Image (cartoon, rainbow, N blue to C red):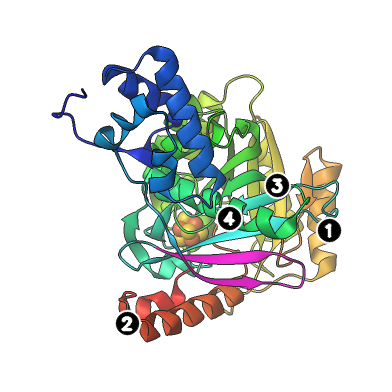
Amino acid sequence: MPDPSPPLIAFADRSPTRWSAAFEGAGLRPQQARNASKQLAQQWYAGGVPWQTCVANLPKAAISVVPALVSPPVVLQLAHRATAPDRTSRLLFGTAEGQLIESVIIPSERGEARGRTTLCVSSQVGCGRRCVFCETGKLGLVRQLSAGEIVDQLRQARHLWERERGVAPPITNVVFMGMGEPLDNLDAVLAAIETLCDDFAFGLSAKRITVSTVGVAPKIGAFLRGTRANLAVSLNAPDDARRSALMPVNQRCSLGELKTALVANLAPGREVLFEYILFDQRNDSLADAELLRAWLAGVPARLNLIPANPGPDPALRQPTRERVWAFQKYLLDHGVRALTRHPHGRDVGGACGQLAGAQRDQLARLAHTRADHAGRAVHGGRAEHGS
Ligand code: SF4
């Protein structure tokens, strides 16, 4: 019989291979414990099978211990879905408390047969970093998401996608570029990545997971030591004065501190993906390109240039194609691996907070209306701007 004293394991906050030890501790033989973990995880994370059924399907010996050890997993409620002509699919999920978070399914631009499919997930409800170009930043931080809530975005999106797309490629990549600053919720993000990579659950390679941060320098070492997932850093200005005006995080973690943290903690063979949103006449001159090149020197890096999406500040506009190309060409001519990612609806290259702000507002308004009709609490007017 299991020891009744330990608290229930929050099921989806731990990766399935870690459940085995708990099941063994409760009296199952090692192989029984492993089989129970595998069966439970495979059924649950495939989606479509209720939790009670997954448990009831376990062998007898496991049924006698599992319900006493694990709490039922967190399940997000799909509040709304909007699909763009390019097949980008935005999912608005409600938490148990009625808060709203967004995930985005982004099909490959190269066509379904050969391409990959990426899911953009949220790591927080709201965000405390208040970048001026970001809709989510206007919310402030409402709360952290648990690892289970992060993982459930993939479980549900994958089930939905595969059911509809038939033989289309499954979701193969995950990016943490939705709502929230992932390094401000690092423990839950690392635990979620462990489950995403767990063979019993999703079996993703860490190389197919990218975590995008505004550059919380003190957390970068812990992130790089904690996972092999890719790190993306949202840069957006070539000097401290302009970066601090766009991204308050820079007032505490300057560009110098950020670079020091990266160089000190990047193991050989690892590199950083930098994201640089181009704002017309703000950070897109050739002099700015030179400042950027100089700052990047010595950091193993790739660079994505992203012409700005419309955001909360109408003064931050998209540059002309000519200015974007001149900026990119300068960097390429000076040895920087720079790509331009155009902000189509499907474009995953949009930096944190830049994922189609206009549609995001529309989505939140729709969900707000639906929630009002259902008589649910959706944090008053704040949901208007939630992503
Ligand atoms: S851009 Fe990212 S870190 Fe900045 S406010 Fe938006 S969600 Fe937060």
Amino acid type, residue under disc 2 in the picture? Gly
Q: Residue at x 47, y 23 (%)?
A: 35
Which mark is first along the chain, 4 or 3?
A: 4
Q: Is mark 3 within 8 Å of ligand 1?
A: no
Give how far apart the Cα atoms at labels 3 and 4 are.
Answer: 10 Å
Residue type, label 4: Ala
Question: Which residue range is magenta in the image?
Answer: 78-94
Report the residue marked by disc 4: 157
Residue shown at 55%/32% (left/top)?
197
Q: Is residue 125 left or right of residue 334?
A: left
Whole-angstrom CA distance, mark 2 to mark 4, is 25 Å
Residue at 53% over, 32% down: 262
Asked whether residue 37 is in view, the answer is yes
In this view, 179 is above or below 46: below
Quarter of the figure that contains the N terminus: top left
Disc 4 crowd rating (10 Å Cα; few below 14, some 14-19, many 20+) is many
Q: Position of residue 37 (x, y in %)?
A: 44, 28
Mark 1 vs mark 3, CA separation in Å: 37 Å
Residue that mark 1 sits on: 326
Question: Which residue lies under the disc numbered 2?
Answer: 375
Give neighbour class at mark 3: few <14, some 14-19, many 20+ (Cα, 10 Å).
some
- Report the mark closest to the observer, 1 or 4: 4
Which residue type does callout 1 highlight? Ala
Closer to the eye: label 2 or 1 = 2
Element under label 4?
helix
Per the image, label 2 sits on a secondary structure element best described as loop
